[in-house]
Image: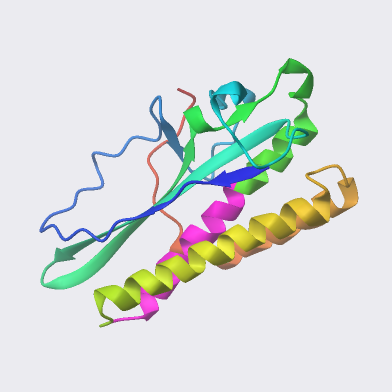
Amino acid sequence: MIINFFKVFIIFISVFKHDSLSCSNEEFLYWCENYRLTWSDFRGNPSDFKTSLGLGAVAVTATKIEVESYVEDGELRFHITNKFMKRKSWVKDSTNQDEHTLNHERLHFDIAEVFARKIRKELAIQKGLSNEAYQMLIQSLLEEKKKYNKSYDSETSHGLLKEQQIRWSEKIKLELEELKEYSFPCPTCSKS
C-alpha cells in the first residue's frame, strides 16, 4: 500500500548547494541505489493515520517528491529529490514484517524514484516554459505516479500474487536502468 505525500516547490534562489545533503534523518531517507529499506525505517504508528486504504492494509510506504527551482549562472535549474517519509510509513505489527511484504513496499519507493527521474528528464528537455507550464508538467507526472502505484497494487494484489510481484520488480528495475542518467547523485547512504 502507498500514500503519496508530495509537494511541488517552485522557489527561486541564487545559490544551491548539494553538499549539505545527508542521506537521511529522523524524518526522511533519500532514495539511494546502494540502500534498501528495512522494517526499522518504517517508524510511523498505524493508529495515528486515518486511511482510505482499508482495514486490510498491513504496511504503508509514504514517499515525497520535492521539486525546487533555482537560478545558477542566469539559467533556471531544478533540484528534484525522492524521499521515503519514515514517520508516515508504517507496518501494523511484527507478524507482518516478512521479506515478501518488505519487497512490495520497497518497490513503491522505487516507483517514486522512477517518477523523480521522469520529472528530471522532462525538465531537462523542456526549456523556457512559464512557471505555470512547469508546474502543470510536474503535477501531471505526479498524477501519473499515483495511477502507476494503484496499478501496481491492483495487479499484484498488494504483493500477494508472487508472479506478478516478480514481473513488476523486473519492470521497475528496467525503468530505473533506462532512466539512470537522471538519477540523483545521493550522498553515501548508510543506516541511520
Residue 174 visible: yes
**Residue 174: % across, % down:** 67, 62
From what the image shows, is residue 147 above or below residue 63? below
In the image, is 36 to the left or to the right of 59? Answer: left
Q: Quadrant of residue 37?
A: top right
Front residue of 36 and 144 = 144
Count of labels shown?
0
Check the picture and name the quadrant holding the N terminus. top right
Name which residue lies at 81% across and 49% down.
165
Q: Which residues are magenta?
A: 109-127
**Residue 106: % across, % down:** 64, 41
Q: Which colouring convention does the figure follow?
A: rainbow
Check the picture and name the quadrant holding the C terminus. top left
In the image, is 114 to the left or to the right of 79? Answer: right
Q: Is residue 118 magenta?
A: yes
In the image, is 150 to the left or to the right of 50? Answer: right
Q: Quadrant of residue 171?
A: bottom right
Q: Quadrant of residue 101?
A: top right
**Residue 29: % across, % down:** 45, 35
Name which residue lies at 73% across and 30% down.
58
Q: Is residue 100 magenta?
A: no
Front residue of 73 and 79 = 79
Name which residue lies at 20% across and 48% down.
17
**Residue 108: % across, % down:** 63, 47
The prevailing secondary structure element of the residues shown in magenta is helix
From what the image shows, is residue 95 above or below residue 159? above
Residue 181 visible: no
Front residue of 115 and 6 = 6
